[in-house]
Amino acid sequence: MAVAMMTTTDRLAQLIKKLNKSWRRDAKKAVAYLQRLLASGMKFEEALDNVQRHYGKLFTLPELRPALVEAAAYAYGIVPTMLTKAQVESMGEELADKWDESGMTLSEKLHGVGVKMRGAIVSTLQEQMRRNKTWTEAARALYDGYGDDGQNVYNGGKDIISRQELPKYLQKVREATGNDLQALAEQRQAIDKINRLAKNGAPNKALQAAYNELLEAVQKGNEKAIEKAVEVAVNEKSRYVAERITRTEMARAWADGFIAKMKTDADIVAVKFKLSSRHPVFDICDMYAQADMYGLGAGIYPKDKLPPLPVHPHCLCRYVEVIEGEVDMQQQRDQVREAGDKWLNSLPESRRAQVLGRKGLKAWEDGEDWRKYMRGYAGLREAKNRLQMYKPVELSEKAKADKYQSPQGTIKEFQTRKVENATYDIHVSENVNLKPKMLAEVNRQINKCIDLLGVRNKEALPKIVIASNDDLNDALGSYVACENKLYINSETLHRKAYEKYLATLKNPASRNPLMTMLHEMIHWQDARKYVAKFGEITQQDEYMAHIIEKHRSFVDKLVQKRYNFAEISDYASRMYIGGRYDEVMTEYRVKKLLG
């Protein structure tokens, strides 16, 4: 369903604003709670533990993950409320995966953010308490230093605070109270009163009363300073940490949604880099938006040569689709360095230094490549995308009987249904719960195999049957030439699990999860070559005898060269011993193609 679109920046900014507003609302309550606990005399570490128990969301940002799904969905072009629960969960998992050079998942980043926010609060309060302690001790030293005889034992009865020392004490007051003007005034009045009384030889009790006033003023100022420190620690330092990860992760989720759409929409032929309307600092983003690096126009890039987003923390710049007909892709040419030079030459020297640094500016002026020095430049490349906007699986109502015969002769019968919304002719066994992610994976594998094998005519592609491990008698895949039917084990469509399985094998042709599909597609390609030369395959045994004999000559040449088939795979070695030269050659080609 298409979205009634406001501008990209406005929609993304709206989502971020919503998150930040929620955080600040909770932060306001947490500040008041923390101030009450500290005023009651509770130690700040214990008080902070209480705050984290009552306002844990401030430190864990649980609202961020669902917001990432919202951002990605809008960028893809659908209203988030149209997503199924399964789609929301799947997208949430994918968007929580790592994407930047830190290699950290969202959970790992949020844990670090929580630690950083607590650290900011602790360090701020510790510093303020240190200042408070220093000034309180200075004030108490004055009080305690006045002896019973009315003379200060520290200065031999001279002025309690000399004119020269007054600025020093007031500076300590400022440090402790954070320049609170009212607190400064109250404490200075108390200090002036002590100084005046001491000069006039006031009786001990009068001075003692004046000292008490000073201590009260110091305590009052200290309390205000702690309140201010709590405000700064939470609403400035911690808020910055929270809003930084919110903006950066939301911008990346938005980019993921856009890239997913771009890759599935053939009408999008290029991408334009647009500056955010909230782009306050001149930096590399200005170059991306203004330089013509591929001859397609300012800020326009081929789909496989994009600046990564976000370009830097807080970046809300965006991609905009360029539709077929809006640009002549025949004009595309790599002129990245020249375009960067031209852009830099258009700037005043101060701007050049801003993006290159002084050292980089000099190097560029001496003829070196600006790409070595441009701040934040990470190259132009095919954009990585964590997100798969999986199609829901739609199965035909009518089931059809199917059967698989293993090499050992075991026959398994089962029912299959056609996947109505699949790109290719795909059927699934009733014993398989085909999920959207699995359907996307089988499509991905077929597409990759088509590219690797250089297939041009897609009309003769095989019927794909996704079957269970039991249906296939533990086989990973099989191709039946006389029916042009390719069986694939559903377990091979759980990519991460299959990668782990392949990692346990002693010597496979490849540990790439594409291995099984490619193996069977090579068998299919051999069969299509046979059909093109001899006509349709009607007898499986007759065809197998032909294809085995066809590949014998190449295998014999390898034998003459003393080739060790175990170097291909353990499976290839076993098949050579069994005379299945077609399997040996298929494994050989898999290894060549996948490495």
Image: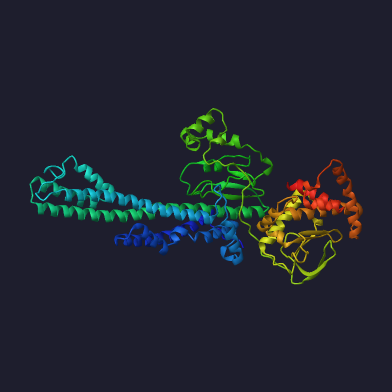
Placement of 58 over or under 379, stated as above or below: below
Query: Where is residue 228 shown, x and y percent of the image?
Result: 32, 54
Residue sitting at x 55%, y 36% = 343
Given residues 474 and 239, the one toward you in this image is: 474
Given residues 479 and 355, the one toward you in this image is: 479
Query: Where is residue 525 shown, x and y percent of the image?
Result: 82, 52
**Residue 84 visible here:** no
Furthest residue in direction top, as rendered: 366
- Would you identify the image quadrant in which residue 157 lies? top left
- Would you identify the image quadrant in which residue 41 lies? bottom left
User: In the picture provided, is 361 more to the left or to the right than 462?
Assistant: left
Query: Where is residue 570 shown, x and y percent of the image?
Result: 78, 51
Placement of 231 over or under 367, stated as above or below: below
Residue sitting at x 58%, y 59% = 93
User: In the picture provided, is 509 more to the left or to the right than 122?
Assistant: right
Query: Where is residue 11 shown, x and y percent of the image?
Result: 52, 57
Given residues 278 and 483, the one toward you in this image is: 483
Where does the N terminus fall, quadrant-wise? bottom right
